Amino acid sequence: MSPALQSAIDVAADSASVIIVIQQKGGSGKSTITVNLAACMGRSAAKLSGPVTADQDSPVVAAGIDPQGSLEKWADRVPEEKLPFDYLVTRGRLGELPKLKADPARRRILVDTPGFMEVDPDAAWGEDPLGDGRVADALREVLDIADLAIVPITPEWLSWEPVEFTIERILKPRGIKFLVVINLHDPRDGEAQLDKVKKWVDDRGYPRMADPVRKYKIHSHAAEEGQVVTEYKESGTALRAREDFMTLALCVEQAL
Ligand SMILES: Nc1ncnc2c1ncn2[C@@H]1O[C@H](COP(=O)(O)OP(=O)(O)OP(=O)(O)O)[C@@H](O)[C@H]1O
Ligand SMILES: [Mg+2]
């Protein structure tokens, strides 16, 4: 057997990596990170064989588990043939993501998670605070198969405590590797608040991406139009915006 064919088989032999984007507080950029990271990974995925056809499975999948999730709303607006990845909306149905992870055509599965509202703040330490219900069960299932968690934090201090909760109460007890990513840094604001959030993360010994994902209007407009960062119309801002997510993709690959 040729070495090239053997290595293609070896790649297919192990299951896809599942990367979840999780943070208890809403609006920190989970859905934005999920789709744009999937776009960058899909764009840079190696093609193992032959020309790509329209019906071929992409090695990269973005998935949403939330019944009312923004991934679903966003997906409704996307011309599917323009995306460099596949997407799956489970609406909380169990079993679909484990099946996807075992699919040899898949290499990376990015999972957008809802902010977990029903969380029980009085749950004792060591106890699962996720509570009951469809979303909680879906969240537990995806946590069971996760290889890495991306935890977005924003310079706004209100988002910091939920990050600590997510890491200390949800990820660490399950032994899930994680990476903190600062999102929504406005370059016009200067570095003072950025340095504060970096210090807060570093003081706790949490691994983080060195540079933040910057805040650009182009991202929020894109969400409305069902666009992803790899497809933005060429401009200086578009290049900087893409650079942030390409850097994140590299950082994630090293963390896996
Ligand atoms: N880097 C960024 N630059 C500009 N806008 C951003 C950026 N990241 C997120 N946003 C915008 O911030 C808002 C919240 O982002 P998003 O919906 O991704 O957060 P979320 O964590 O998924 O929220 P929820 O918990 O409600 O699902 C959206 O309007 C989105 O377009
Ligand atoms: Mg969301």
Image: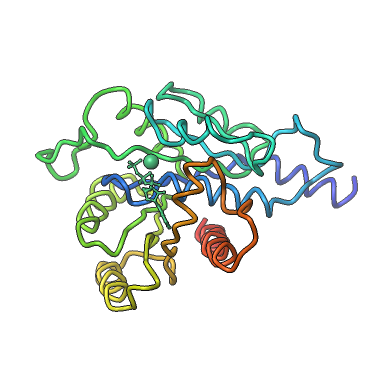
| Quadrant of the frame with the N terminus | top right
Residue that lies at the very extreme toward the left in this rendered image:
122
Which sits in the foreground, 43 or 208?
43
Looking at the image, which residue is at 58% across and 36% down?
A: 78
Which sits in the foreground, 199 or 106?
199
**Position in image of residue 243 (x %, y %):** 57, 65
Q: Is residue 212 above or below residue 127?
A: below
Q: Using the rendered view, name the quadrant where residue 70 is placed.
A: top left
Looking at the image, which residue is at 65% across and 48% down?
A: 42
**Position in image of residue 149 (x %, y %):** 41, 50
Q: Using the rendered view, name the quadrant where residue 215 is placed.
A: bottom left
**Position in image of residue 44 (x %, y %):** 68, 54
Which sits in the foreground, 227 or 118?
227
Total tally of numbered discs in the picture: 0
Q: Using the rendered view, name the quadrant where residue 65 is placed.
A: top left
Which sits in the foreground, 244 or 210?
244
**Position in image of residue 109 (x %, y %):** 55, 41
